[in-house]
Image (tube, rainbow, N blue to C red):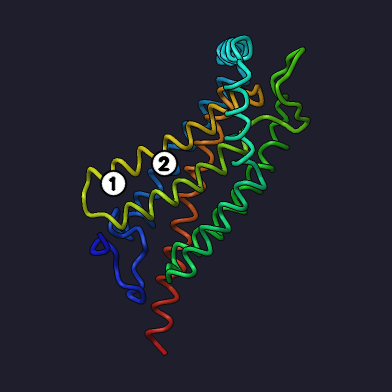
Amino acid sequence: MDGGMDAIGTHRTPWSSLHHARDIGGAHLWRTLITTGCLLSALLVLIFAGSIAALDLRIAGELHAHSRPLMTGLMRVISISHGLTGISILSAALALYFASHGQRKWLVLLIIATPTGMLLNAALKLAFERVRPHFDDPLVLLYTYSFPSGHVAASTVFYAIIGGYLATRMRSRPWRAIVAAWSLLMIMLVATSRLYLGAHYLSDVLGGFVESIAWLALCVAVVDLSLRDSARWTQTQ
C-alpha cells in the first residue's frame, strides 16, 4: 500500500495522490470554500429566520424524552473523549506518529489546522451568542454558547486528516471509500452524542461540520503553497 505515497523530499503535497497540488491550491480550494460558505450562510439564514428552529426543538425534545441510562453513558464517553482535552490528546498522539514516521507535511497540516480551528470555533460562538438547548432535567450542564458545535468542528478536522492520510496510503478505490466512510462515521458519532446529551441543536452540529470543512480546505492550501515556496527557495540556493 505504500506505493500510493510520494517519497519524502519530493516537495509534493501528502494529499497529491488524491488530488493534484494545483487543484487543492487553486480551483478546487475555491470551489470548496465557496460551496461551504454558501452552505453555512444558508444555515445561518434558516436559524435566525426561524425556519429550522422548529426542527431543532423537535429533535432535541425527542432525543431527551427517549434517553436511557445505558445510552447516556455511551454518549458521555464519546462526547468527553472528543472534547477539548480528549481531542488535544488524540491530536498529540497523531502528531507524534507523524513525527516519528517522517510525515512532515501531514504534521504541519495537523499543527496548523487543529488549534487554529478551535480558536475559529470559539470566535464564532462569541459572534453568534446562540443559547444552548434548555431542559428541566438536563443530561449535561453547559454555560458556553451553542453555535457552531466545537466538538463536531474539532472532530471533523481530526478525522478528516486521519482519513486523508490513510487514503494516500492506499491505491484501491474501495479501500479509500471505506476510510472515507469510517471518518464520516466517527464525526457522525460525535455529532449524535452532542445531540443526544442535549448540548446542541441539529443546526449547531451541521454548522460545526461545515465550518471545519472550509477551514481545513484553507489550511491545506496554505500548507501546500508554503511547502512549494520553501522547495523553490531551497532549489535556488
Residue 56: which quarter of the image? top right
Disc 1 marks which residue?
A: 176
Residue 32 location (% of width, % of height): 40, 43
Residue 140 location (% of width, % of height): 72, 26
Disc 2 marks which residue?
A: 183
Q: Taking 189 as reference, is 179 left or right?
A: left
* Residue appearing at x 34%, y 68% in the figure: 12
164 up-or-down from 236: above or below: above
| Tag 1–tag 2 contact (CB < 8 Å) | no
Q: Taking 184 as reference, is 123 left or right?
A: right
* Residue appearing at x 40%, y 77% in the figure: 231
Say the numbered circle drawn on residue 25. Answer: none
Label 2 residue SS:
helix
Residue 21: which quarter of the image? bottom left
* Residue appearing at x 36%, y 76% in the figure: 9
Point out the image quarter for the C terminus: bottom left
- Amino acid tagged 1: Arg
Q: Taking 174 as reference, is 57 left or right?
A: right
Report the front residue among 195 and 1.
1
**How far is mark 1 from mark 2, CA to CA?**
11 Å
- Amino acid tagged 2: Ser
User: How would you rate the neighbour count of disc 2 (Cα within 10 Å): few for under 14, some for 14-19, many for 20 or more?
Assistant: many
Pointer 1 or 2: first along the chain: 1
89 up-or-down from 204: above or below: below
Point out the image quarter for the N terminus: bottom left
* Residue appearing at x 42%, y 83% in the figure: 234
Residue 218 location (% of width, % of height): 48, 52
Label 1 residue SS:
helix
Q: Taking 97 as reference, is 68 left or right?
A: right
